Image (cartoon, rainbow, N blue to C red):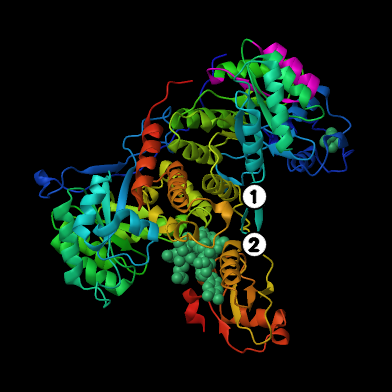
Amino acid sequence: MALEFPKDSWSGSVQEITLGATAADGGTRGKTLTVGGAKTMPYIHFEAETPHKPVIALEIKDSFPEDWSPLLHETWGDVLNDPGKWAAAAQEAGADLLVLTLGLTGKDGKPNTPDNAVAAAKAVLAASDLPLIIVGPGQAELDNELIVPVSDACVGERVVLGLCEDKNYRTIAASAMANGHLVIGRAPMDVNLSKQLNILIKDTGLPFDRILMDPTVGALGYGIEYGYSVMERLRLAALRGDGMTQSPMIVVVGHETWKTKEAKVGEDVPEAWGDWLERGITWETVTATSLLEAGADILVLRHPESLKRVKKVIDSLLTVPEIT
Amino acid sequence: MALSGIEIYKLLPKTNCKDCEFPTCMAFALKLAAKQVELSACPHVSEEAQTLLAASSEPPVRLITLKSKDSEVKVGNEVVLYRHEKTFYNKPGFFFRVKDSEDEAAIKDRVKEIDGYNVNYVGIDLFVDGFAVNATSDDGAAFAKAVQAVRASSSKPLILISSNPDVIAEGLKVLEGEAPLIYAADPDNWEAMSDLAAAHKASLAVKADSLAEIADLTQKIKDKGIADLVLAPSGRDFSTSLLQNTVSRRLALIKNFRPLGFPIISFPCDTDDPDLEVALSAQAVAKYSSFIVMDTFKKETIYSLLVLRENIFTDPQKPIQVQPGLYEINNPTPESPLMVTTNFSITYFSVANELESSGIPGWLLVSDADGMSVLTAWAAGNFDAERVAKDVKQFNVADKVSKKQIVLPGHVAVIS
Ligand code: B12
Ligand code: SF4
């Protein structure tokens, strides 16, 4: 019997977006990265080819990440005190791009300053030639205060700025617009909110090929199923031709997994939880793999070993199988 | 696949005779589509229509049950490709592989450890489902001995792996009265394997290089009267497995293609890269596998997979909740502090575990927040000062607790 594989016929596709700029385009990145462009549900190669691989970013911070798991402190060691060195180490570890998260406070414990943020961004750009995403600490006022000067300082590099949220997107979007950068819009796990936020951002005049979407995800064991389903629904909507859901998706897997008790705590936990380090890495790897299946385009991770494993998953997912 | 009301209507006599006690055939058809009446209520339906309607009421993915003397694993009966469309119903089983070439004592020890594994996640006990015994020796006696060794340490359901029917027969003898899964019928041995499955009421996995060949085989085997089949596609890497599982499931659900309307077995254990076994298993959970066979047993990895399975198979309409109420932590007295949280089970258990391990006695008021996390409930208006005040009254907190202050989750300090 010959089997006919049942194909969905989609009218839409995910927006292609290019991050970073090389010397040819006025930047200093070694190469650019293009994400998105999918025309099928994730990796259904018999319907259409997957034009671009999902990529993995490693997250670094502008100052020592006190609140990170001790396992991450141990893994990265001294570089954690120096964003430039950390960026170089992350590139060395195989990251496709970097996310620099700015803290609420500086080294001295006082509120973070634009000078500090700009210095960190510049150090990262100097130490690594990967495309860069820069995200504020997550408080509207401080975000704007830090991200705007960073955006100015990175002009020409086509960096990604975050986070745009429904109550705070204008300033960041305007600054991205002025300096040729991109933005991330984050909405709390809801298809319609993601869509509305994209509309708001686009209405500021920023072209749609400069908007990434963070649908908000939970870690394994802490609500992963909500993010997973919202992502599947966003991808389905994109393929059905709903334009404002067609942004590539970025998911902060490292941030979510490494704050779970499983990854963060090594003592006084149930014996059935097994080895701490391997558990942390597995938590991050399993969360990342699941969200890849749901359509993630950019995964932001924290542990270099997880990066190594998830890269292998991606390579296998992208290998077009013999039709069987 | 289930027929719609209109499709059923076309098969009815269309006389509106009312003998079914519905005013019209259409009204009856709609009730039938909603499974609220039995077809037998219409005395006039033709035999042909009866056959068609009976076939359409079969589930698109057959329900398969493996049984041992004291437990069972039920899989299949799925109705959607994406969990948000309804829910995924029957969780895949995790089976650990044992080879009959291993030393008997080693088998017993390994099986015992895995069999005893139990981890608690949000109040639910999670464990491994069974074992897959692989006849690498291709020797009936050695195989039977290995099955016995497994049975000495575990009473969970089993999968028997060999392409030699004689070897499988020896294994089955050890499992009198059980319904294991035989792996596998292939284009060469399917007749003998079918006979064995029939004789022992075992389920039978069907293996071939391509899905088309598997579909051919399941039809031939079904014609012999064996219905409890499991698909065993050949893919061992991510993209091939994803393709084969997706195509099988789409054909079964969308095209009502019976030859592939069965649960699927996957072998992440066959990867040549041990780093990938867990990730392949994770894909199998989300993407339509019902039996997942693994080699590497590590507590931390099986824990992560069991949790993933709980999460992916949670009904999207119903977050896992705990009963709202006033909970005692570490034998509190009236003077002990009073804390409040929500009844989303992940929230409740994170907090309760933390408090319990601190050793400090206290009262935990679990507020009726519709099963939402602290911030979600706060954003949705289900966890505010009013709600908490109501629950303090409703659960008679003042009778048990003398403290007038309430400790709130830090995230919602604003409601104080
Ligand atoms: C999963 C999720 C959902 C799920 C709900 C799951 C559920 N059953 O609750 C869904 C998708 C349905 C959802 C919906 C919404 N969500 Co929501 N959601 C999340 C998400 C990703 C995770 C929440 C979670 O499960 N956390 C894990 C649990 C265990 O955490 P927790 O309850 O806070 O408990 C911890 C602490 O608070 C503390 N704690 C708890 N109790 C106590 C008690 C004491 C005494 C102490 C000391 C400590 C303590 O200990 C716990 C363990 O650390 C968060 C973002 C995030 N990553 O945090 C957003 C988030 C909570 N959601 C948000 C919003 C806005 C919404 C919506 C309003 C948006 C919408 N879509 O319309 C809706 C509201 C619901 C509705 N109207 O239907 C916002 C809330 C913003 C705010 N500050 O108000 C968040 C923060 C996302 C964001 N950054 O914008 N959401
Ligand atoms: S008994 Fe049968 S034929 Fe008569 S109205 Fe009902 S469905 Fe129609």
Q: Which residue is mark 1?
A: B118
Choose between B127 and A111: the one closer to the eye: B127
Label 2 is found on which chain of the structure? Answer: B
Query: Is A324 placed left or right of B232 in the picture?
Result: left
Q: Quarter for ligand 2?
A: top right
Residue at left offset 33%, top offset 40%:
A37
Q: Position of residue B349 (x, y in %)?
A: 60, 64
Asked if residue A220 lies left or right of residue A57, the reply is right
* Horizontal side of residue B2 vs A6, given as left or right: right
Horizontal arrangement in the rendering, residue A213 relative to residue B413 (left or right)? left
Q: Name which quarter of the figure residue B260 lies in.
A: top right
Q: Is residue A230 above or below residue A122?
A: above
Confirm whether residue B91 shows in the render.
no
Q: Which residue does the image show at 77% across and 42% down from the upper left?
A: B35
First in residue order: circle 1 vs circle 2 = 1
Residue pictured at 36% horizontal, 69% vertical: A167
Q: Magenta span covers which residues?
A: B189-211
Q: Secondary structure at mark 2?
A: loop
As drawn, A38 above or below B328? above
Question: Which one is nearer the viewer's eye here, B267 or B408?
Answer: B267
> Which image quadrant is residue B232 in?
top right
Task: Check the picture and name the quadrant holding the N terminus of chain A.
Answer: top right
Front of the two marks 1 and 2: 1
Q: In the depicted view, which residue is nearer to us: A309 or B147?
A: B147
Location of mark 2 (residue): B321
Is residue A195 or residue A118 the one in the foreground?
Answer: A118
The type of residue carrying mark 1 is Asn
| Amino acid type shown at disc 2 | Gln
Q: Secondary structure at mark 1?
A: loop
Magenta segment includes B42: no
